[in-house]
Amino acid sequence: MIKKVKQQKKEMVRTPKGMHDLLPTDVAYYEKIYEKARLISEFYGFSPIETPHVENTDLFIRPLGEATDVVEKEMYSFKSKGGDMLTLRPEGTAPVMRAYYEHGMQSWPQPVKLYYNGSFFRHERPQRGRTREFRQFGAEIIGEQDPIIDAILIKIAYLILKEIGFPNVLIHINSLGDRDCRGQYKKELLAFSKKKFNYLCKDCKRRVKDNPLRLLDCKDTACVEIRAQAPQPIAYLCNNCKAHLKGVLEYLDEGEIPYTIDHHLVRGFDYYGRTVFEIFLEEDEAGALEEVKEGENKIVSAVQLAVGGGGRYDELMTLLGGKSVPAAGFAFGLERIVHEMKAHEIATSKIKQSPKVFLVQIGAAAKRRSFKLVEELRKGGVSVGESLSRDNLRSQLSIAAKLGAHFSLILGQKEAMGDTIIVRNMIEGSQETVMQKNLIDFLKNQSKKKK
Ligand code: HAM
């Protein structure tokens, strides 16, 4: 007996978990943000840079920090066929610094101002505001330590969001001090954490020695309570770091950029020193709120998600093994900004204009001629819609009407043979036959007449 093999239903392949397609209506939002960010950055002297999506893993380990979430558990790392350890970039600052060094930008006029835009990858637990592929717009100023640089970056981030149309942009700022004063502060925080060790969450207990700063931005309820009594970095700043912070705040006051000093702001990477900041949009019901869940019964308050963050990273180059270079920057998370644009009903600028001219063709000869005619119209500067795959006159005319075309160009067998074309005025209902060679001028004259 022949055994009947039950046909297994094949499941359609879908996007990987935590990664999403951007459909045309979504892309319009991203383009609006990018356009604003690019125009403002270029006005302030930034140039674009693009770095690879894949880098040597070592580029991220030390600068970001071995005891950080990203390096510990979120990097997409793999061994290449040639045996190299590579990583899908989780962030853009270390790659830009690598490029600065690799291309000898130290010899360019300083500071070097660069911006970038693209996808980044972190293997996070997908939830609201966190995806595994996300897009950032980032800006970096390399080669200058003056506090005005930090303030310029904050101002640019602020302006971009304001000009996109957000009424309230909130900047949270803090200073972590330089290596020396931060070292002193870390010791104090470690001593404090040891005293409270039994009350810390599992993650903080594990990392307290390697990364005591983590306690300050831990979302666990118990840790949030403990940190209220923890020493604060600002109290340990040396005179130079104090003066730097004072300078940044004075420039922000001068520029009328509202900010809040946030004593618990530490940011997630080891490369930061001195200024750190995060950018939030006004909290509302539809805002970017995240519920942090750890296990079954542990729920912590909803926390607001930053749409951007950055700071000074004067020590990054030395962490990479190079000579120290002062630098600062920020990056926006575009998914989170798009989410907020939708919540605030901020329109995208690019509403695709339908062409005012639509080409209708009937019959094989006309269809062949249309194939070339569309290109002649494009070269002549006439935007034309078409549905060349359809053969039916009525269905083509109905598309033209739906698009709101002012003119339909009708090309039948007779017209194709005689090098003519019928131009139907869809609004007035009139039509006339025009020589194909005169078509572009005819359409241009018609549109001039309308003006
Ligand atoms: P970051 O804070 O890790 O900083 O990321 C910047 C922004 O990217 C965040 O504020 C957030 O809006 C967005 N973002 C981060 N992870 C995700 C995710 N999984 N899903 C969606 N959005 C996300 C940096 O990356 C630094 N390189 C910024 C910087 C530039 N610092 C100095 N220069």
Image (cartoon, rainbow, N blue to C red):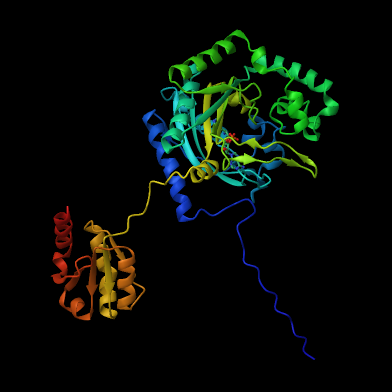
Quarter of the image where one finds residue 366 = bottom left
Query: As drawn, is 236 to the left or to the right of 192?
Result: left
* Left or right, 276 with reference to 196: left
For this view, does 69 lie left or right of residue 311?
right
Is there any visible trace of residue 435 in the rendered image?
A: yes
Of the 4 image quadrants, the one containing the N terminus is bottom right
Residue 227: percent from left, percent from top = 73, 24
Query: x and y percent of residue 348 in the render?
Result: 41, 47
- Identify the residue at image location x=55%, y=33%: 280
As drawn, 199 above or below 136: above
Residue 184 horizontal/vertical position (percent) = 71, 14
Q: Is residue 322 visible?
A: no
Q: For the point 75% across and 85% down, which residue is it?
A: 4
Viewer-proximal residue among 297 and 20: 297
Q: Is 141 drawn above or below residue 127 in the view shown? A: above
Q: Residue at x 62, y 44 (%)?
A: 130
Which of the four quarters of the rendered structure image does ligand 1 lie in?
top right
Foreground pick, 439 / 25: 25
The answer to whether 145 appears left or right of 433 in the picture is right
Q: Residue furthest right?
A: 198
Q: Nearer the viewer, residue 311 or 116?
A: 311
Residue 115 lies, in percent from the top left, at 46, 34
Q: In which quadrant of the rendered view does residue 190 lie?
A: top right
Outermost residue on the bottom side: it is: 1
